[in-house]
Amino acid sequence: MGFSSAKMRGYQVRNGCHLAGFLDFIERIAHSRKRLRPDLSASTWSIYQVAADVTTGRMVRPAGIRPALDATSGGRMMPTTRSTTTAAAALGMVASLMLSGCSSEADYCSQLTATEAAYDDLASTDVLSEGTDTLSERYDAFSEQIDQLLDSAQAEFAEESDAVRAAVDQFGEVVDSAADLNLGDAAQQLVPALSSLQTSTTALFTSVTEACE
């Protein structure tokens, strides 16, 4: 089964953290081997193949690190103590950069449930029986929740977020005008605005849900 674009974005964010942890683990191994074997065996060459090029996904040797030829081992490629230290430092730098700001999940994942609940409360408002004051209160509660979600989701879901912002603003205008209308007219004006809001929020909620699974 293939990944949707939204789910792939979430997968990349979470696995960036996993890769950082892996590189940190490799760095620890390199330092341990250096302490135990100052001369370093040829097997330590494998540490050079661990640094990940996070842009292309290729496995590369850290820039500026060159192996040394060991005359006692038939000219096989062997890292020197200095180059191994440099390799460990490079791996540690990559891990540190990736770990900074890294969390188990994106903020929008933890914000989704509360935002969906606020939307459901707003969408289920019966203006004829509950009045425009209740509608306004629920809109304010939803607006607060959706603003937080949009702030954290904008970078990953720009198109969906822009559509939701426009629909929220449009719905807000209808809510403001509803206070000056009789309840029947207010209810009629809310129908198309709510339909637009439903379409845009459903698209965003779906994308966020897939990315957070």
Image: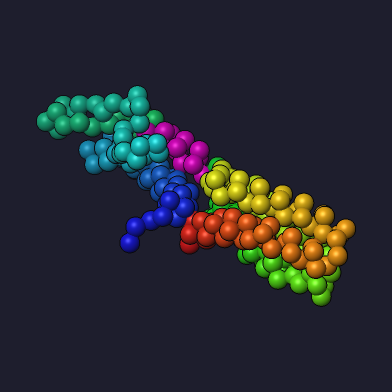
Q: Residue 80, position in %: x, y?
A: 29, 29
Q: Would you say the magenta stretch is mainly helix, strand or loop?
A: helix
Tell me which residue sits at (56%, 44%) in the image. 158
Circle count: 0
Q: Does the rendering let one see residue 26?
A: yes
Tell me which residue sits at (59%, 55%) in the image. 200
State the residue in front, 186 or 49. Answer: 186
Q: Is residue 138 magenta?
A: no
State the residue in front, 60 or 46. Answer: 60
Q: Quadrant of residue 47?
A: top left
Residue 162 in the figure: left or right of residue 168: left
Q: Does the rendering let one see residue 145?
A: no
State the residue in front, 31 or 93. Answer: 93
Query: Among all residues in the image, which is located at the extreme right?
Result: 180
Magenta span: 87-99
Q: Residue 1, position in %: x, y?
A: 33, 61
Query: Among all residues in the image, which is located at the extreme bottom?
Result: 129
Query: Among all residues in the image, which is located at the extreme left?
Result: 74
Q: Quadrant of residue 122?
A: bottom right
